[in-house]
Image (spheres, grey):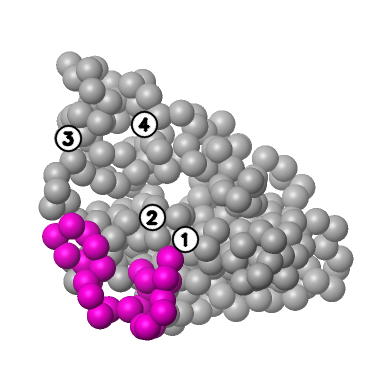
Amino acid sequence: MVRMRTHIVYAHPDNGSLNAALRDEAVLTLEGLGHTVTVADLYAMNWKAVADYDDFGPTDSERFIAAAGEAWTNASLAPDIKAEHEHLLAADNVIFQFPLWWYTVPAILKGWFDRVFTSGFGYGPTHDWPRFGDGVLKGKRAMVIVTTGAAEDHLSERGVNGHIDDLLFPLQHGVLFYPGMAVLPPVVVTSALGMDAARYTDTVKHLRERLETLTETEPIAYRKQSEDYDEHRRLLPGREAPGTTGFALHIAR
């Protein structure tokens, strides 16, 4: 059995919630598979959600991005950011678990991305900085576990909420794939409010199956910037299937 390290970034304020129960099931399953598991429970950590100059230590720069890059270079970032960098760099898999609030992640998780994916780590100031399939986190696998009160039909192609793949595209492609992680299809738990015992049992079974197959699951086939885009970062002609538009253009079929 391959021993792996998995870091879970978890964002839900209620420790008696469905999310908390699924988090605990995930940890038990992964540890049962021999994984070393670390959990960043952002609410329990009272995670600071605002990226500001306090993250950087002493700096002579008045420009925010320059100060962030200087702090990365000088190893003067805030201790909580450094700790998350260490977890990410050590991990083989990174799981992000959260409820879908107003079509996106909770503010505390957005703040985790703002602070942890800082200049020099998540992105860089130069034109040729590796991104979209390359970067500091290349070689790691990411997966989203998301709960939503909306029903599955509401999140379908013709559903009033829009397709769940479209709602998650900015996160999965624009945040996780950007610094190089291979992004697995998400675990989506719909109709989360008032879930009965039978559905909970089925949900846990599905979650366990996905966690047991982390290494075998094919990532979403997002196109790499270094291979499929021109110097203006526009998709090269002929890459897409006829009639393809929108987010689907950036996924190889």
Q: What is the three-letter code of the residue carrying label 3?
A: Thr
Is label 1 in contact with label 2 (beta carbons under 8 Å)? yes
Q: Is residue 248 inside the magenta stretch?
A: yes
Mark 3 vs 1, N-terminal side: 3
Q: What is the three-letter code of the residue carrying label 2?
A: Gly
Task: Identify the residue at horizontal 26%, vertical 68% (top origin).
Answer: 235
From the viewer's perspective, tell me whether residue 122 is left or right of residue 170. left
Percent position of residue 240, x then y: 33, 78
Q: Say which quarter of the image contains residue 180.
A: bottom left
Crowdedness near tag 3: few (<14), some (14–19) or many (≥20) residues, C-alpha within 10 Å: few
Q: CA distance from mark 3 to mark 4?
A: 15 Å
Mark 3 — residue?
73
Vertical side of 233 occupied by 81: above or below: above
From the viewer's perspective, tell me whether residue 17 is left or right of residue 84. right
Which mark is on residue 169? Answer: 1
Mark 4 — residue?
79
